[in-house]
Image (cartoon, rainbow, N blue to C red):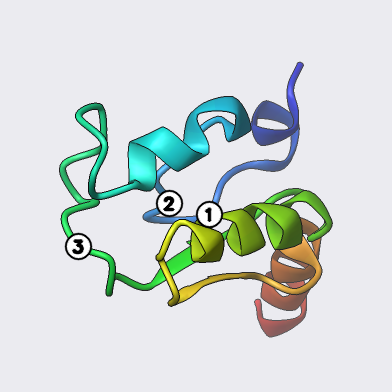
Amino acid sequence: MDQRERDGALPGAVVIDRNVLEWRLDPSSAHRLPMARDYDRRIVVVCNEGYSSSLAADTLQRLGLLRATDLIGGFQAWAAWRQEAG
């Protein structure tokens, strides 16, 4: 069982595997997702605990997606916040 099956998912999230992230979000890529049309789009990368997503957001910024960022603490921090707010 993977983490998304076990823990759930962020509502409205677009799931992109890490190994294809750059070419799926790069507006200049012929294989980009339809939502990745321009370099000014806000992209929030989320991983389980916020470590891999920080590296991925940095990589996206280096591609010119300067508004790319990540969720501090990742999905686990969001889930804890949701539990407290719930």
Q: CA distance from mark 3 to mark 2?
A: 19 Å
Residue 15 appears anywhere in the view? no
Please name the residue that numbered disc 2 is placed on: 13
Residue 32 appears anywhere in the view? yes
Q: Give whichever of 81, 15 is nearer the camera.
A: 15
Foreground mark, 1 or 3, reads: 3
Q: Residue at x 36, y 46 (%)?
A: 25
Relative to 74, is 41 above or below? below
Relative placement, left or right, of 9 versus 82 is: left
Foreground mark, 3 or 2, reads: 3
Name the disc covering residue 65, or none. Answer: none
Image quadrant containing the C terminus: bottom right
- The amino acid at mark 2 is Ala
Residue that lies at the very extreme toward the bottom in this rendered image: 85
Residue 83 placement: quadrant: bottom right
Relative to 56, is 22 above or below? above
Q: Position of residue 4 (x, y in %)?
A: 65, 34
Image quadrant containing the N terminus: top right
Relative to 8, is 58 above or below? below
Relative placement, left or right, of 35 versus 20 is: left
Please name the residue that numbered disc 1 is placed on: 10
- The amino acid at mark 1 is Leu
Residue 62 placement: quadrant: bottom right
Q: Position of residue 29 (x, y in %)?
A: 26, 36
Crowdedness of circle 2 by 10 Å Cα count: few (<14), some, many (20+)?
few
Q: CA distance from mark 1 to mark 2?
A: 5 Å
Q: Give whichever of 80, 39 is nearer the camera.
A: 39
Q: Give whichever of 67, 70 is nearer the camera.
A: 67
Name the disc covering residue 38, or none. Answer: 3
Q: Residue at x 28, y 66 (%)?
A: 39
Crowdedness of circle 3 by 10 Å Cα count: few (<14), some, many (20+)?
few
Mark 1 and mark 2 residues within 8 Å of each other at the beta carbon: yes
